[in-house]
Amino acid sequence: MQKIESVPDMRLRAAHLKQAGKTVALVPTMGALHAGHAALIGMAKASAEVVVVSVFVNPLAFGPSENFAGYPRSPDADSKLCEELKVDVLFAPSAEEMFPRGHSTTVNEDTVSRALCGPSRPTHFRGVTTAVTKLLNVVRPDAMVMGQKDAQRVAVVRKMVADLHLGVEVVVVPTVRESDGLVVDVRNRDLTATQRQEALSIYVALQRAREMVAQGVRSTDRVIAEATHILGERRRVRVIYVSMVDPLTMETVREIVPGRTLLAIAVWVDEIRLIDNILL
């Protein structure tokens, strides 16, 4: 595995890969790699001849009240996992490398990013689209692999890729869950045993929604009310949103169309923010 930390070196490597006719898949991450990322890497290996994993804690994705400095970082463990999974290139630029002094250009997606996490994290998706655009320009992949857990991020990036004719395929991997159903997430390591039990109400709410739809319920109001009730029974859980949306546009829907309706949930478990979703 080759580890690259500078943009010019990564661009040079990407150019050599193109000249050699190699197909490239990019797995963009913020590091602290876990089983969810391993699934993304597995899909990337099946999608292209060369796999590039980027590890970049993107400062633009954090709002003024969000803790960029405290975001989990484990560079040695990340490198070891990538080695074990036979990643070809680990691209690990610093914030200063990606956004040098004087950087003043951003990329906005103004429709899909408005819903769900948009109101509570108004600058987040601008940070995501800006960093992803730069990564695509540097790595020049044929495919980019993302996780269904971040459904709105996937939808925003897909819209940006289409609107800007970036010519990369966005491949989405199903959500990876732990044995108890909790979605695999870097934040899980911060949960106490009690908080984890509270957080499991998210999965319980999603599963109950799936049961209701299987029983013929098509009213979004009924399903949302039931999911919200389940979450509300937990003392430490504060609901940010429980929404039923179109999985491509993130627009609110009023009637459930099986296979084409996304139930998305975001909550605080004490001070830890968690998201999850399910396609009904």
Image: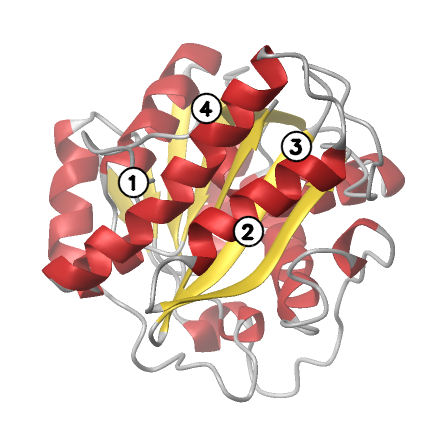
Query: Which quadrant: the N terminus?
Result: top left
Amino acid type, mark 3: Leu
SS class of the residue under badge 1?
loop
The reply to whether residue 120 is in sight is yes
Instruction: Please name the residue shown 81% across and 56% down the image.
Output: 109
Name the residue beneath numbered marker 1: 182
Marks 4 and 2 in Cβ contact (< 8 Å): no
User: Label 2 vs label 1: CA separation?
Assistant: 17 Å
Which is closer to the viewer, label 4 or label 2? 2
| Foreground of the two, 166 or 34 | 34
Q: Earlier in the sequence, mark 3 or mark 1?
A: 1
- State whether residue 81 is above or below residue 142: below
In which quadrant of the rendered view does residue 2 lie? top left
User: Label 3 vs label 1: CA separation?
Assistant: 18 Å
Q: Position of residue 237 (x, y in %)?
A: 39, 64
Amino acid type, mark 2: Thr
Instruction: Please name the residue shown 32% across and 37% down the image.
Output: 37
SS class of the residue under badge 2?
helix
Q: Earlier in the sequence, mark 2 or mark 3?
A: 2
Q: What label sits on residue 262 in the rendered view?
A: 3
Q: Position of residue 239 (x, y in %)?
A: 52, 63
Which is closer to the viewer, label 2 or label 1? 2
Q: What label sits on residue 174 in the rendered view?
A: 4
Name the residue beneath numbered marker 2: 228
Disc 4 crowd, CA 10 A, few/some/many (<14, 14-19, 20+): few
